[in-house]
Amino acid sequence: MKIAIVDDDVSVRNALARVLTADEIETSTFASGAEFLDSLREQIPDCLTLDLQMPGMSGLEVQQALRDAGLSTPVIVITGNDDSTVVKRTLDAGAIACLVKPVDLGLLLDAVQRAVAGIRAKPVG
């Protein structure tokens, strides 16, 4: 299983990669949505963890670009914003889960397993 990690914060990317690698999950990291989308020419990951608020291209814009390209790569959104409307928007846009920073590692690993199994979270509200 290969997970792509997209977050503009290098410490978050590295922490998520360490946790997933320790669980024997292969990871690749990207500092921006554009960098991740460019990588799809070479390989499509089994799942994607995606920050919502990034400079340039937001996480929601990355989700839309994936849909526009006809890709159904499962997305786990990770955000610093715990507003229920934001959570609902990401789930409505197709995310498997929306986790709030700092991320509970158990919830992250559970979300990855659900994403790969194709089980979506229910929208909040």
Image: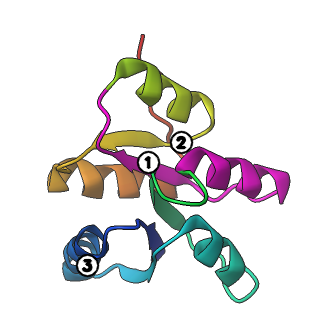
Q: 67 or 12, which lies in front? A: 12
Q: Residues within 10 Å of mark 1 (few under 14, many from 20)?
A: many
Figure quadrant of residue 65: bottom right
Q: Residue 50, image x and y in percent?
A: 46, 57
First to last magenta residue range = 59-82
Q: Are marks 1 and 2 in contact (CB under 8 Å)?
A: yes
Q: Are marks 2 and 3 in contact (CB under 8 Å)?
A: no
Q: Are marks 1 and 3 in contact (CB under 8 Å)?
A: no
C-alpha distance separating marks 2 and 3: 22 Å
**Residue designated by label 1:** 77
Q: 60 or 54, which lies in front? A: 54
Q: Is residue 118 above or below residue 41?
A: above
Residue at position x 27%, y 54% from top?
Answer: 108
Say the numbered circle drawn on residue 95: 2
Q: Residue 66, image x and y in percent?
A: 72, 57
Which of pointers 2 and 3 indicates the residue nearer the eye?
Answer: 3
Q: Residue 92, image x and y in percent?
A: 59, 28
> In the picture, which quadrant includes the C terminus?
top left
The local secondary structure at tag 2 comes to: loop
**Residue designated by label 3:** 14
